[in-house]
């Protein structure tokens, strides 16, 4: 119990002043003497520049030193990136003490408060990461052919499972340690690229302490999240008319008039992320269709046969339209769609109430508004 209190205190009192300054780090390592004569490698990224270093293990010991402009995760280990024995460390000002009786992957990490805080989170993530890496290596080692093609489905399912677990674990860590820079660092990692979803991330970001939000990274993440917040939220929907798979004309206005909530979902049969997202839309539709929720999917396809086949294959029993003009789809242009999947949720008054809802975030939002 006393140890837990010490850890929590350590997570709360990490100095913030140095995060935007040049930082000196040291790693002192103790490993099994069987590694003597081998080179151990350290790779990390600083200010968007990839860096790498290696040192010789002598008498069961090694030492790295370096300069970084802000706290960053480094990968330390033997062998290559895919199959080597490695561990992730959070590098920052100060000295990290690493000791490993056998595998580096299970080394004991002590020293800086940030490294110790990072290790608390890393221990929760590693089993799932190891499982995913096992699937990757299994897939990579299969010869080309039917067996490898069949393994794609298993791999994608494992990737989805890991992605959800990682995000949930990081968000839970933020809730438990809102004053830890580690919480901010990993929340920022989950919000990279398409995953920078306001609806998904900002509620968790808002729980971080004022001091953590005030750091350079905190300000950058908040600015990025606010920039992707649905600009259409609170505005009236933009009507359009397009063609159904049966060849009839259908307007968004007509769909909205018959339902309490309408998800306008932009997708395409050739879009991998869209097809991976479809099961979540199906689940949400099936759960809340009896409460006035429906979907109007707008496809950016050009081939009618592939479009219709994808609708059937993914089991999407709702409204569908497309002009079959690909990225020149007029409805997509009205909503400034430049990447897919993308969506807007509209209520019966024609107001946009949310945008770019993904996976469980879509389910939870529709559940919230239909209660």
Image (cartoon, rainbow, N blue to C red):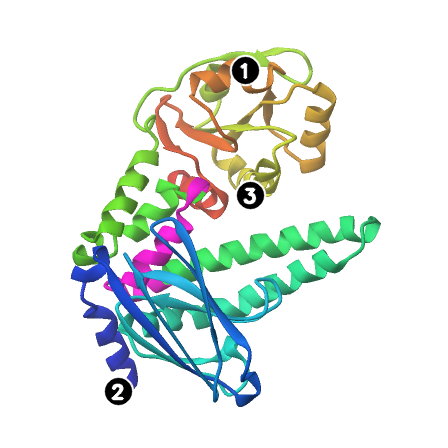
Q: Residues within 10 Å of mark 1 (few under 14, many from 20)?
A: few
Q: Quadrant of the C terminus?
A: top left
Task: Based on the picture, tell me whether residue 217 belongs to the magenta stretch.
Answer: no
* Marker disc for residue 213: none
- Left or right position of 361 against 36: left
Label 1 to label 2: alpha-carbon separation: 62 Å
Q: Is residue 262 above or below residue 175?
A: above
Look at the numbered disc 2 and give the secondary structure of its residue: helix
Residue 2 falls in which quadrant of the image? bottom left
Look at the numbered disc 3 and give the secondary structure of its residue: helix
Look at the numbered disc 1 and give the secondary structure of its residue: helix
> Residue placed farthest to the right in the image?
146
Residue 252 visible in the shown view = no
Name the magenta segment's main secondary structure.
Answer: helix
Residue lying at 34% horizontally and 19% vertically, measured from the top left: 236
Which of the two marks, 1 or 2, is nearer to us in this view?
Answer: 1
Residue 359 pos. (x, y %): 50, 45
Label 1 to label 3: alpha-carbon separation: 26 Å
Residue lying at 73% horizontally and 29% vertically, measured from the top left: 309
Residue 7 pos. (x, y %): 28, 78
- Disc 1 marks which residue? 328
Q: Quadrant of the N terminus?
A: bottom left
Residue 293 pos. (x, y %): 49, 33
- Magenta residues, as a range? 173-194
- Left or right position of 12 against 29: left
Q: Return the disc, 1 or 2, that comes first in the chain's sequence.
A: 2
Which of the two marks, 2 or 3, is nearer to us in this view?
Answer: 2
* Marker disc for residue 2: 2
Q: Return the disc, 2 or 3, that comes first in the chain's sequence.
A: 2
């Amino acid at each position: 119990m006393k140890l837990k209190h010490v850890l929590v205190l350590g997570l709360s009192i990490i100095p913030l002043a140095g995060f935007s300054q040049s930082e000196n780090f040291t790693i002192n390592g103790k490993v099994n003497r069987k590694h003597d004569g081998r080179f151990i490698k350290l790779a990390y990224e600083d200010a968007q520049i990839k860096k790498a270093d290696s040192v010789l293990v002598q008498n069961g010991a090694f030492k790295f030193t370096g300069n970084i402009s802000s706290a960053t995760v480094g990968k330390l280990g033997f062998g290559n990136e895919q199959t080597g024995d490695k561990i992730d460390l959070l590098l920052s000002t100060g000295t990290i003490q690493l000791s490993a009786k056998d595998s580096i992957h299970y080394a004991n990490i002590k020293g800086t408060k940030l490294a110790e805080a990072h290790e608390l989170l890393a221990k929760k993530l590693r089993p799932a990461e190891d499982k995913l890496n096992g699937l990757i290596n299994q897939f990579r080692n299969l010869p080309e052919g039917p067996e490898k093609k069949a393994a794609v489905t298993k791999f994608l399912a494992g990737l989805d499972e890991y992605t959800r677990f990682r995000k949930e674990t990081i968000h839970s860590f933020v809730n438990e340690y809102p004053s830890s820079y580690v919480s901010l660092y990993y929340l920022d990692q989950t919000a990279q690229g398409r995953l920078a979803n306001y609806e998904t991330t900002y509620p968790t970001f808002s729980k971080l302490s004022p001091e953590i939000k005030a750091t350079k990274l905190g300000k950058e993440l908040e600015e990025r999240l606010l920039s992707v917040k649905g600009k259409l939220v609170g505005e009236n929907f933009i009507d359009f008319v397009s063609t159904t798979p049966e060849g009839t004309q259908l307007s968004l206005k007509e769909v909205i008039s018959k339902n309490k909530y309408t998800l306008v979902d932009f997708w395409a049969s050739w879009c991998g992320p869209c097809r991976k997202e479809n099961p979540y839309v199906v689940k949400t539709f099936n759960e809340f269709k009896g409460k006035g929720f429906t979907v109007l999917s707008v496809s950016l396809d050009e081939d009618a046969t592939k479009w219709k086949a994808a609708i059937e294959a993914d089991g999407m029993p709702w409204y569908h339209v497309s002009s079959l003009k690909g990225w020149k789809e007029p409805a997509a242009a009205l909503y400034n769609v430049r990447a897919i999947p993308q969506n807007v949720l509209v209520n019966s008054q024609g107001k946009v109430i949310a945008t770019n809802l993904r996976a469980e975030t879509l389910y939870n939002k529709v559940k919230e508004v239909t209660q």
